[in-house]
Amino acid sequence: MKRSALFAMAWIVLAPAVAMAEPAKPETIEEMLTVTKAQSMIESVYKNVDDSMQATMAQAVAQMPGDAEAKRSYAESMGRKMAAIMREELNWDTLKPMYLRIYSDSFTQEELVGLLDFYKTPAGQAAINKMPIVMQKTMVEMQQRMGPMMQRLGQAAQEAIDEAKAKQAAAKPAPAKPAAAKKPASK
């Protein structure tokens, strides 16, 4: 009974604070997207993805039989088509409503105002401008770590399989030995 009374009292005290949290205003979200340069960051991703797609297509086509010039032309054409589809599906006009919804669902007005206050400072602008570099360097280093980690995971998996097989073998009953024929009693 005491627990439910405490819960009820906590709800009475906290409910007004929760109810008072003002939802994020669309214009504040718009300002946040502008200050954080969300659109230009999305557009800069296109260049990296374009380059990546071209390289991937060139590698894939290099494995195919045929004339080198025809393969190069095919890779370029396919890369352009894939990039065009990506730009069509992931352009700013398509993504902006998603960003507005996510920010609205994730932040209160007060939180966004606080973030905007920070992002407008020199330190905040440095965070915005340097974060793509930080993320890129992080990805490179994470990829370097993945190889050794995958190797260790593979070894651990093999050890677990070997251990399970050993336990299974130990748990099997030993095959019964045929009963020795009784010797006739000697006289």
Image (spheres, helix red, strand yellow):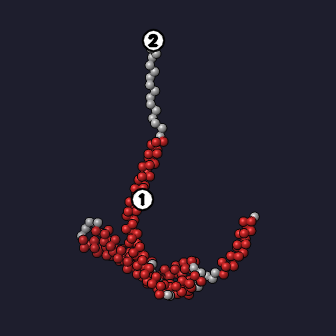
Q: Is residue 160 above or below residue 130?
A: above
Identity of the amino acid at label 1? Leu
- Give residue 42's position: percent from left, percent from top: 44, 80
The residue at the point 48 percent across, 84 percent down is: 124
- Give residue 174's position: percent from left, percent from top: 46, 36
Task: Please name the residue that numbered disc 2 is placed on.
Answer: 187
Q: Is residue 49 left or right of residue 123?
A: left
Q: Secondary structure at mark 2?
A: loop
The residue at the point 40 percent across, 81 percent down is: 44
Task: Please name the residue that numbered disc 1 is placed on.
Answer: 153
- Give residue 51's position: percent from left, percent from top: 35, 76
The residue at the point 28 percent across, 75 percent down is: 73
Earlier-in-chain disc, 1 versus 2: 1
Q: Is residue 101 visible?
A: no
- Locate residue 178: give its quadrant: top left
Q: Are marks 1 and 2 in contact (CB under 8 Å)?
A: no
Q: Secondary structure at mark 1?
A: helix
Cα–Cα span, label 1 and label 2: 69 Å
The residue at the point 42 percent across, 52 percent down is: 159
- Give residue 175's position: percent from left, percent from top: 45, 35
Q: Quadrant of the C terminus?
A: top left
